Image: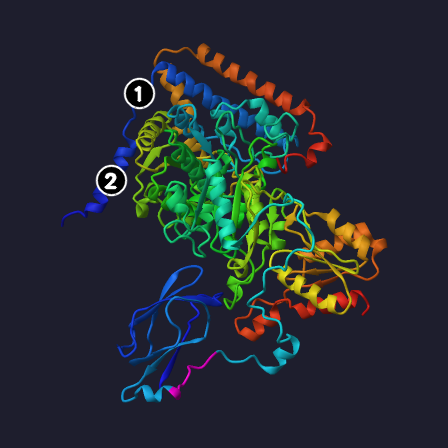
């Protein structure tokens, strides 16, 4: 009996997804390592400050997913826009926003990116082309498509990146946006960060189609599954998608297969998965360890790597210090920034 | 018996049309489904198909006749075996059933809800119009179109998107001619996907463009209300002033005619509650034009509530190169010293007619058109109430948590000592909009209710 073509194609796709990606130069490895470490140490510190009561409300940590934003950012050029959902601290740091401004926003201080009025889920930087930070699951997908619309309207060659999760992938407006993006050939990359859990619901319990790279099939949008734990694979896929968009061919979907080590938010005990599952991925696939190991194999010394870590820790500690000592916004700020 | 062909109603709000062309001549044979004539409404040219078979006996309304009222006999069809001699004994198809008696008792027959007339010449001169300005008469539909066209000529970042805005020329023909002038890049037909295109509009606005997002009606904007409120209205605040959006959401709001509950809802109160939004709901043609231009230029998100019943109404619009009416200013449309009537949008048609009725009985009403619901021009309301000591609000929307309730609260807070009677509210009834003609009429406010309320606060 002939094997059905479909499964062969699927295997080929899987194989392609896990083929080892192009090597990084030493400089690229160091950039990736430093940027991922900054996010990791920043998030660890944020978790610590949350525990101390310095950060309130919701706080969604990005630990484990660092390779996704760092790899994608390496594929962009200045002027490309980024927009994401509520798990956004990593995206902001990757876009070049300052750690102290982000941390001070988390603590609700005047020196935060939104003067303390936005908090963890709502930060923006026009200068760095970061368009938020959105708390409504899926809303950023339409908004990011609108950023691409503006690029197309202006006739420039910038690309917008709309990040969202496996959970948001089931929202209706995502597909409304897919339809218009392909119809109008808008330069937008939909980066689906599949970290396997939408809050506490695993993808198999929430999604009829768990291959998210196929979510654009009905609209003829090409998609690709990517090892989101390998920053080189992310960068390579990002390059391909960016080239597609800049060439005026319309949107592109990248499913980043990644994992979050922490709970959905700080109050999530994560009972929906085993400790072993988390530990195994952490041990086998950690995005930062992968780079460290390659650098060590390439004869970089532990000493040099520790120096990078120390430099990053210094930035993070300074941001935490600033965020705890900066004043809260003046009471008069209550009534500012409602209209302009 | 010969059959009469009546002037058909080709849309829920059509009252009259032009008989553009007869495609059949007297004496010609007609089969069911044949196109016999072309009729122009203010929105489109439509074909009239015969539903009966026979011979076209007599054309009663010649081609080229303008403003033929709906249900006017336009031709007579003779059945087989009948001749011109039979033309006298015609049978007309049944017309709409008359409303039951009890409905008549509550809604006075003098009041024609389907056709609120344009405001009478304003008693008060308009502060925004320089003395001696030439005025042109135009429909509100054209005033809106001109406002968009002028702003699109002025600023290349302004564009229009929505369902049927381009090739179809607008579901209500508001965007007529814009595609031809500005091209498909700036006049964009969207799929039927309100949530998605509202989000795309807001995203484009965040990056600095100035979209006009048309909703075919605001009823459909419910699908998009998350993007309007959570993304458009709040981002400036949440970004500490860094990132706002200059965007207009516009389209018909409130009750049209005979389209039932899902297509007849007034969102004035909904949007006017939200900080970060501006909400505009004009009544006169001049205000439609001047306020839409202001809305497009405004750096904030503006909800521009239109009224389908008013689209075909004409009014005087100043012939000025750049007529912009400031957002946030009410207008005293009629001055009077006995009672203040506060309304906006189509509510004004009841208010102004009621003021005419009241004048006959010696009660001089001061009628305020709010024009903007947020920010609300409380000063104008309070100054008037301090003068009259009495106030009535008029709205088509529901009473609970309505705009009238807000106006009444502000009067109570800022002019309590000047009040000679509690404020009264005339509003839409607390029910989903019914379809039946008589019930629909009962569900909406009426001139009689406004007159009654004004008399009640005047202890008359």
Instruction: Let me know if residue A200 appears in the view.
Output: no
Give the alpha-carbon distance from disc 2 to disc 1, as whole Å: 24 Å
In the picture as drawn, the residue positioned furthest to the front comes out as B132
Name the spot of residue A214 as percent of width and height, x first: 32, 43
Q: Is residue A332 left or right of residue A300?
A: right
Density class for disc 1 (Cα within 10 Å; few <14, some 14-19, many ≥20) is few
Residue that mark 1 sits on: A23
Q: Is residue B278 or residue B4 the one in the foreground?
A: B4
Please provide the residue range marked out in magenta. B88-95
Density class for disc 2 (Cα within 10 Å; few <14, some 14-19, many ≥20) is few
Q: Is residue B375 left or right of residue B33?
A: right
Q: How many dots with numbers? A: 2
Q: Name the mark on residue A11.
A: 2
- Work out whether A56 lies above or below B114: above
- Work out whether B165 lies above or below B445: above
The answer as to whether the residues below labels 2 and 1 share one chain is yes
- Locate the C terminus of chain A and report the quarter of the image it occupies: top right
Q: Name the mark on residue A229.
A: none
Magenta portion: prevailing SS class: loop
The residue at the point 31 percent across, 34 percent down is A248
Residue A97 in the magenta stretch? The answer is no
Looking at the rendered structure, the secondary structure element under dot 1 is: loop
Looking at the rendered structure, the secondary structure element under dot 2 is: helix
- Work out whether B402 lies above or below B87: above
Lower position in the chain sequence, tag 2 or tag 1: 2
């Amino acid at each position: 009996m002939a094997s059905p073509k479909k499964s062969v194609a699927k295997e080929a796709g899987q194989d392609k997804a896990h083929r080892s990606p192009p090597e990084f130069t030493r400089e690229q490895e160091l950039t990736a390592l430093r940027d991922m470490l900054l996010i990791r140490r920043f998030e660890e510190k944020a978790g610590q400050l949350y525990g101390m009561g310095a950060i309130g409300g919701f706080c969604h940590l990005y630990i484990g997913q660092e390779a996704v934003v760092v790899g994608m950012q390496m594929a962009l050029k200045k002027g490309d826009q980024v927009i994401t959902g509520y798990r956004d601290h990593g995206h902001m740091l990757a876009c070049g926003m300052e750690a102290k401004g982000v941390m001070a926003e988390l603590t609700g201080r005047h020196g935060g990116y939104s003067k303390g009025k936005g908090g963890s889920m709502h930060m923006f930087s026009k200068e760095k082309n970061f368009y938020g930070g959105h708390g409504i699951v899926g809303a950023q997908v339409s908004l990011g498509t609108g950023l691409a619309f503006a690029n197309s309207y202006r006739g420039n060659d910038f690309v917008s990146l709309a990040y969202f999760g496996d959970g948001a992938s089931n929202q209706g407006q995502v597909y409304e946006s897919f339809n218009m993006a392909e119809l109008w050939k808008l330069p937008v990359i939909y980066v689906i960060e599949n970290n396997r859990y939408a809050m506490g619901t695993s993808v198999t319990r929430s999604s009829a189609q768990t291959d998210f790279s196929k979510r654009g099939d009905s609209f003829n949008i090409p998609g690709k599954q990517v090892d989101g734990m390998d920053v080189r694979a992310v960068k390579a896929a990002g390059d391909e998608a960016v080239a597609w968009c800049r060439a005026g061919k319309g949107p592109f979907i990248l499913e980043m297969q990644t994992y979050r080590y922490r709970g959905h938010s700080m109050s999530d005990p994560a009972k929906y998965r085993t400790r072993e599952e988390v530990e195994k991925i952490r041990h086998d696939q950690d995005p930062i360890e992968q780079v460290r190991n390659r650098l060590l194999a390439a004869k970089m010394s532990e000493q040099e790597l520790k120096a990078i870590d120390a430099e990053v820790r210094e930035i993070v500690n300074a941001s935490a210090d600033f965020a705890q000592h900066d004043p809260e916004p003046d009471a008069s700020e209550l009534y500012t920034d409602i209209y302009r | 018996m010969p059959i009469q062909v009546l002037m058909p109603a080709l849309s829920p709000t059509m009252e009259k049309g032009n008989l553009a062309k007869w495609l059949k001549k007297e004496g010609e044979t007609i089969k069911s489904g044949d196109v016999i004539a072309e009729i122009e409404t203010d929105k489109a040219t439509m074909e009239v198909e015969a539903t009966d078979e026979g011979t076209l006996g007599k054309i009663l309304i010649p081609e080229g006749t303008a403003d033929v009222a709906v249900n006017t006999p336009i031709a007579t069809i003779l059945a087989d075996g009948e001749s011109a001699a039979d033309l006298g004994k015609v049978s007309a198809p049944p017309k709409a059933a008359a409303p039951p008696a009890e409905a008549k008792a509550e809604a006075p027959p003098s009041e024609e809800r389907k056709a609120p007339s344009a405001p009478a010449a304003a008693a008060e001169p308009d502060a925004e119009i320089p003395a001696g300005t030439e005025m042109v008469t135009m429909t509100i539909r054209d005033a809106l179109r001109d406002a968009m066209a002028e702003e699109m000529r002025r600023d290349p970042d302004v564009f229009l998107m929505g369902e049927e805005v381009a090739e179809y020329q607008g579901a209500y023909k508001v965007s007529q001619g814009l595609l031809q002038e500005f091209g498909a890049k700036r006049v964009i037909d969207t799929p039927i996907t309100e949530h998605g295109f509202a989000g795309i509009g807001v995203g484009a606005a965040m990056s600095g463009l100035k979209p006009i997002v048309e909703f075919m009606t605001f009823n459909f904007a419910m699908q998009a209300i998350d993007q309007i409120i959570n993304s458009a209205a709040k981002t400036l605040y949440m970004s500490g002033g860094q990132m706002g959006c200059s965007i207009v959401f516009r389209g018909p709001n409130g009750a049209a005619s005979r389209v039932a509950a899902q297509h007849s809802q007034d969102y004035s109160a909904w949007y006017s509650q939200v900080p970060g939004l501006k909400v505009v709901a004009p009544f006169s043609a001049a205000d439609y034009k001047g306020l839409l231009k202001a809305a497009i230029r405004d750096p904030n998100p503006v909800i521009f509530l239109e009224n389908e019943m008013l689209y075909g109404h004409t009014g005087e619009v100043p012939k000025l190169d750049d007529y912009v009416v400031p957002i946030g200013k009410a207008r005293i449309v009629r001055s009077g010293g006995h009672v203040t009537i506060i309304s906006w949008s189509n509510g004004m048609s009841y208010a102004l007619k009621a003021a005419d009725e009241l004048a006959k009985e010696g009660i001089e009403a001061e009628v305020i058109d709010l024009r903007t619901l947020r920010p609300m021009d409380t000063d104008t309301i309070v100054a008037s109430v301090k003068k009259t000591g009495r106030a009535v609000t008029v709205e088509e929307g529901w009473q609970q948590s309505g705009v009238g309730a807000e106006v009444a609260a502000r009067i109570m807070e800022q002019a309590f000592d000047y009040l000679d009677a509690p404020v009264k509210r005339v509003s839409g009834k607390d029910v989903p909009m019914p379809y039946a003609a008589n019930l629909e009429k009962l569900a909406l406010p009426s001139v009689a209710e406004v007159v009654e309320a004004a008399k009640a606060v005047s202890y008359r």
